[in-house]
Image (cartoon, grey):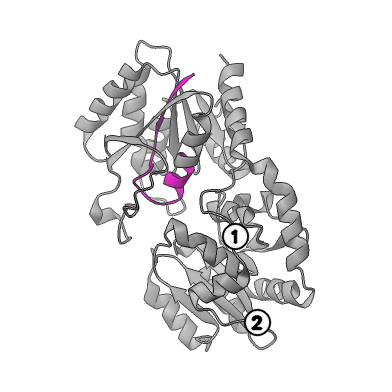
Amino acid sequence: MKIVILSAAYPFRGGIANFTNLLAANLKQNNDVVVYTFTRQYPDLLFPGKTQMEPETGQKPITSIRTLDSINPLSWKKTGKLIKRENPDLLIFNFWMPFFAPSFGTVAKIVKKNSGVKTLAICHNIVPHESKPGDVFLTKYFLSKIDYFVLLSEKVKEELLKLKPRANYKVLFHPVYSSFGNAVSKKEAKERLNIDAGKVLLFFGLVREYKGLDVLLEAIAKVKNQSDVKLIVAGEFYDSKNKYLRMIKDLNIEQNVSVIDKYIESDEVKYYFSAADAVVLPYKEATQSGIVQVAVNFAKPLIGTTAGGLKEIIEDNVNGFLVQPGNPDDLANAIIKFYTEDKEEEFSANIVKISEKFSWQKFSGELLKLVNVNN
């Protein structure tokens, strides 16, 4: 099958780009796959991070064709025409926010005109975590150009069906992020990161308000008198960093929290996860989380909330603990229970048992089956 993927991809960085890189690599095993990506993903004015690009390392996970400027309609038409010339059987989009709906929708419209090309959207979100006026209108425009949908959680399915009740869809799992290398020993990881604490929890990824870091900091303040725990906060701040630094100071947990305010490069990710006893996801709301599947890759227990699709992966008292969103007391009790009942080895073993069902091979097979069955 000839497949074109249009999405964030290498040399862009981040979860969606990593997802695309792994998807393309897997689909290429049995298909002719071409990846198109952005010349400009976000205007600098709208991007809160330090850089949108992966560093130059010499190692390229995939090769991509950079043609799409998210805010230049002329590039949308150019990209549509270029993809149409590829004569693909299937055009796949990764969709995660309405900002890209006009460009993606225009490309899909051009490629589909007078052709038998099928379009499929892998929807990481339908409704953004921080919504703005016009989001629904833009999203509906994009959805109207898509034939098939792959959804990564039941929450996303509910959101899709509200906007497109007759959508042809399949709910799959978010596959494991397996591109960060193999785990190392805790000793090696802690030495690498200069961590001298015995008990280590990890909050990983971009810091945004809905991810509930403030709730976790309150929980750590409650935990510290019963357990000498070190929380590593590793990721760029897309929310006010000073707000959290003030909380850390006011809660008197400066000795219990280490803030690494930077995007963690791919070759460093394994050290953060290997150093941790568990990964904490105190999300106030969620669809699903790629961080969960990085943790699964490294067989790390999960302490998270029942928000969105997190509960579809985290099994309470089996591979982690689930608590109600926005409740620092419940979260603190779960952390204390994790250590007092010595759950790390048991939960890690159960994570390993489920990791195979989140393989890219199974995900890709189910994705193609959706299209082929409905042809």
SS assignment at label 1: loop
Q: Amino acid at mark 1?
A: Ala
Q: How far across and how far down the image is residue 133, in percent?
A: 36, 47
Which residue is located at x 53 percent, y 76 percent? Answer: 191
10 Å crowding of disc 1: few (<14), some (14-19), many (20+) = some
Tell me: residue 261, above or below residue 81. Answer: below
User: What residue did someone put label 1 on?
Assistant: 183
> Dividing the image into 4 quarters, which one contains the C terminus?
top right
Question: Is residue 10 shown in magenta?
Answer: yes
Q: Position of residue 289 (x, y in %)?
A: 55, 52
Residue 63 location, quadrant: top left
* Amino acid type at image mark 2: Val
**Image side of residue 342 versus residue 191, left or right:** right
User: Can you identify the residue that label 2 sits on?
Assistant: 223
Place of residue 259 in the rendered image (x, y in percent of width and height, measured from the top left): 45, 75
Do we see residue 124 in this rendering? yes
